[in-house]
Amino acid sequence: MASAKPQKPVPFPTPETQHFWDGTKAGELRLQRCDTCEHVYFPPRPFCRECGSRSVSVFEASGHATLYSYVINHRPARGFDGLYAVAVVELEEGPRMMTNIVDSPQTPEALVLDMPLEVVFEPVSDEISLPLFRPAGT
């Protein structure tokens, strides 16, 4: 009997992050903005880290980003085939987030810092889709 391919780890939503995971399932990248100082932030939390206000709103981000930093992982990891980039992207709205780069060779020649990226979503369960990024226009 053949064994199934190991799956990527699946995040567990909390009350503070549920809106984010509901968004990724719907194909939207949702961020939060402070209603008091207008600071946009990620990861999700119930208050603004800049001014401490609990008056925050959720909005749909553009899905556009640039590659801020990355490392190419060469070690085997559950749910990944071969090499893969663990990246930090800077979203057009300002916050940075950790993610993976897809639809691109996983080489330093292909993964150029500041390259434009766009979000794509990978379903990993019935409830969770992961936000990943690929070179813009691919």
Image (tube, rainbow, N blue to C red):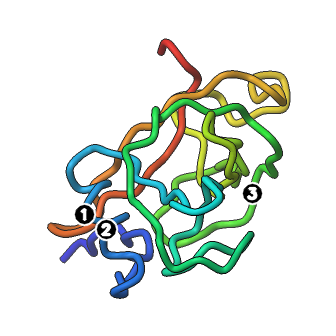
Q: Which residue is mark 2?
A: 19
Crowd around label 3: few <14 · some 14–19 · many ≥20 (10 Å): few
Q: Nearer the viewer, residue 9 or 117?
A: 117
Q: Secondary structure at mark 3?
A: strand
Quadrant in which residue 17 is drawn: bottom left
Q: Which residue sits furthest top?
A: 137
Marks 1 and 3 sit apart, C-alpha to C-alpha, by: 29 Å
The N terminus, quarter of image: bottom left
For residue 10, side relative to residue 84 (left or right): left
Give me the residue at 45% from left, 41% from top. 61
For residue 25, side relative to residue 65 (left or right): left
Q: Which mark is residue 22?
A: 1
Q: Which residue is mark 3?
A: 73
Tag 3 or tag 1, which sits nearer the N-term?
1
- Kind of residue indicated by mark 3: Asn
For residue 131, side relative to residue 95 (left or right): left
Q: Are marks 1 and 3 in contact (CB under 8 Å)?
A: no
Q: Secondary structure at mark 2?
A: helix
Position in image of residue 48 (x %, y %)? 62, 72
